[in-house]
Image: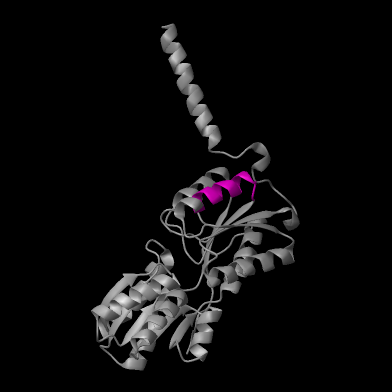
Amino acid sequence: MKKSISLLLIIILVISLSACSMNPPEWAKPGKHKELKDMKIGLSISTLDNPFFVSLKNGVIQEAASKGIKVITVDAQNDTEKQMNDIEDLIQQGVDMLLINPTDSAAISSAVQSANHIGIPVITLDRSADKGKVETLVASDNITGGKMAANFIINKVGKHAKVVELQGTPGASAARERGQGFHEIADKKLDVIAKQTANFDRTQGLNVMENLLQGHKDIQAVFAQNDEMALGAIEAIKSSGRDIVVVGFDGTDDGIKAVKEGRLSATVAQQPVLIGKQAVIAASKVLQGKKVKSRIAVPLKLIQ
């Protein structure tokens, strides 16, 4: 009997300790502040190797500075596990709000739910979280952007042109949505002969495009789901000596420069700085107890 009671006490103790480890220490728990200048925002970026996300981060920092809000930034380096650990560290540092640009929309869900459990509000930027409560998603309309790219290709090379698609990181909502919008038009009016991921990366875009060029001699156009992959693709195409229309997505400085120089046919331009600023504006409202829309759309434009 005594042995049973002792075992039960041990089990209860282990469960209690486990529950405690899921929460930050008392000093780190988010508090109720009257002034925005007392607030602390944790910003988790998928990767700062991509100029688009550097601009997004700068938008967050600029707007936060104008409001006197402190920002702690962490770079996941396109590593889902690192992003989860980064967010746990931000929680331990007592942030009042989390701004998350997910590496993977499904994988980030558990981190969002952990923040929900503790009472830390979450806003996602550019990419959504599949599960958990998010106050708002601040992003471009990626589906519309994908359609814009498809329609540009049709206008440039005609219906039923043979097209390949360079896809972004699997699991990222932006990749899913841009692909969805593109295929809503392309599957009816173009001939998509190949699609392959290059993980939103310039070097991978170059390598994947080289392989596609070897396997397909009749490619007329390329839709790359971001400018980094598009810039890699045009280097591969240049080496091949072929004339192929390439459309990117994001409107980064490098992408716009390539369009102006005639190397890139077009880019569907986002406004990453504005995405970052709008996220902080929404965060400040949430921290003051105000309601925000479930999605805040930032306008797109085609640069050609």
Q: Residue at x 41, y 82 (%)?
A: 235
Taking the image as drawn, is residue 263 in sight? yes
Residue 27 drawn above or below residue 74: above
* Quadrant including the N terminus: top left
Camera-nearest residue between 215 and 221: 215
Residue 181 drawn above or below residue 281: below
Quarter assignment of residue 156:
bottom left
Name the dominant secondary structure of the magenta segment: helix
**Which range of residues does the magenta coloring cover?**
83-95
Camera-nearest residue between 106 and 131: 106
Colouring mode (rainbow / by chain / secondary structure / one colour): one colour
Asked whether residue 94 is drawn in magenta, I would say yes
Residue 201 drawn above or below residue 120: below
Report the side of 55 relative to 155 (left or right).
right
Q: Residue at x 45, y 58 (%)?
A: 129
Asked whether residue 288 is drawn in magenta, I would say no
Q: Residue furthest front?
A: 239
Quarter assignment of residue 183:
bottom left
Camera-nearest residue between 23 and 86: 86
Report the side of 287 relative to 144 (left or right).
right
Instruction: Give the percent coordinates (x, y) of residue 67.
Output: 73, 64
Q: Residue furthest top?
A: 1
Q: Residue at x 43, y 69 (%)?
A: 200
Quarter assignment of residue 159:
bottom left
Q: Residue at x 53, y 43 (%)?
A: 117
Taking the image as drawn, is residue 178 in sight? no
Instruction: Give the percent coordinates (x, y) of residue 229.
Output: 42, 75
Instruction: Give the percent coordinates (x, y) of residue 246.
Output: 39, 85
